[in-house]
Image: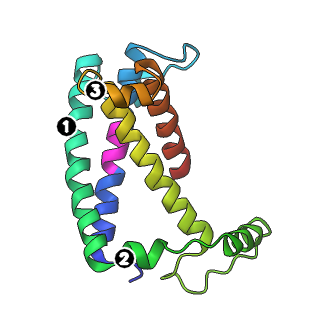
Amino acid sequence: MVQPGWVRITHWINAVAVVLMVMSGWQIYDASPIFPAIEFPPSITLGGWLAGALQWHFAVMWLLVANFIVYLALNLATGRFRRKLLPVRPKQLVADLLAALSGRLKHDDLAHYNSVQKLAYLVVIADILLIVLSGLAIWKSVQFPLLRTLMGGYDNARVVHFMCMSVLVARCC
């Protein structure tokens, strides 16, 4: 096995939860679009209407929070984060990126990540952090005025949330 069982389980929980979050998020978005040209068909949304979508979104959010705590705790306790994702050396990143673009990136040892994979994981982690922060700025805008301000206001927080979701969805496709 390349990955421990707990990594596979937490990743699959995340996969299902993120799909549900995206589908309910699209229903929430359709109720008040920030980009009028983008509308998601009801067949790929979840919740049926705004309040139903919000209920799904918040319920699944707590599943993600619990799963993240387990994932983070186990990664830190086992040293897996440090071992798998660090360091990312610029010289090696450029070499691996050029090798990947030319189709010559080696995958001899699946237990070790190359620099491109490390960077991709770190980008996803940063993206998820921005999704959480922008989500908090949207959900609890009054309670987190500094966060709302840092996002450029409520509407910009919605744009950041949408763009980060788009990056996450594009990364998974």
Quarter of the view holding residue 139: top left
Mark 1 to mark 3 CA distance (whole Å): 13 Å
Disc 1, SS? helix
**Residue at the spot of label 1:** 59
Q: Which residue range is magenta in the image?
A: 16-21
Q: Nearer the viewer, residue 51 or 129?
A: 129
Disc 3, SS? helix
Q: Could you tell me which residue is drawn at 60 percent across and 86 percent down?
A: 108
Relative to 156, is 17 on the left or the right? Answer: left
Q: Could you tell me which residue is drawn at 47 percent across and 47 percent down?
A: 127
Q: Nearer the viewer, residue 89 or 8?
A: 89
Disc 2, SS? helix
Q: Is residue 82 visible?
A: yes
Looking at the image, is mark 2 or mark 3 earlier in the sequence?
A: 2
**Residue at the spot of label 3:** 139
Looking at the image, is mark 1 or mark 3 earlier in the sequence?
A: 1
Report if residue 129 lies within the magenta region.
Answer: no
Q: Amino acid at mark 1?
A: Ala
**Residue at the spot of label 2:** 80
